[in-house]
Amino acid sequence: MSTLERAIVIAAETHEGQLDKADAPYVLHPLRMMLSLSTSDERITAVLHDVVEDCGVSLEMLRAEGFSEQVLEAIDSVTRRVDESYEEFVLRAASNPIGRRVKLADLRDNSDLSRIAHPTAHDYDRIEKYHRAMDTICALEGSDGS
């Protein structure tokens, strides 16, 4: 089994029973992100991007599964710390080249209100926050030549 296939299995198992804001299986979110990215490392990171933060999986567990240090560093970069503001988190995610692309894919997918039948004011506020984060990341991309 390839590392991407293993990542998909881990994501499916750890997100089992979870639903997104539209009441769809949560695992579809990382899979949509995966399909929007280009490299194997980006795709693996996308598939696993929420398992550490939301599912109790540790980076050590993923290391034991054979994922590369580059992928583990990228996953860590898109895993929000308990004591971290959202703005600090976005800047840290943007500091990792893979994390930056994965976080943009995450923000784009989370900004898609077409999956929500009746968006609320809270949904629109959330989307505005995501758009500000995308602007921040894109501005950083332009400043470092990436």
Image (cartoon, rainbow, N blue to C red):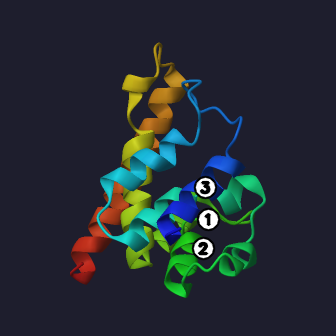
Q: Sort mark 2 into few (<14), some (14-19) or many (20+) by Cα contacts within 10 Å.
A: many
- Real-space CA distance between mark 2 and mark 1, rounded to the nearest whole angstrom: 5 Å
Q: What residue sits 50% from the left and 40% below the top?
A: 28
Quarter of the image where the C terminus is located = bottom left
User: Residue at the spot x=69%, y=75% of the render?
Assistant: 59
Query: Disc 2 or 3, which lies upstream in sequence?
Result: 3
Disc 3 element: helix
Nearer to us: label 2 or label 3: 3
Residue on which the image places disc 2: 76
Between 76 and 26, the residue placed more toward the observer is 26
Q: Residue at x 51, y 57 (%)?
A: 47
Q: Is residue 6 left or right of residue 41?
A: right
Which image quadrant is residue 72 in? bottom right
Q: CA distance from mark 3 to mark 1?
A: 19 Å
**Residue at position x 78%, y 59% from top?**
56
SS label for mark 1:
loop
Which amino acid, mark 1? Thr
Residue that carries the numbered disc 1 in the rendered image? 79
142 or 42: nearer the viewer: 42
| Label at residue 9 | 3
**As shown in the figure, which amino acid type bears the numbered disc 3?**
Val
Q: Nearer the viewer, residue 87 or 111?
A: 111
Residue 130 horizontal/vertical position (percent): 43, 46
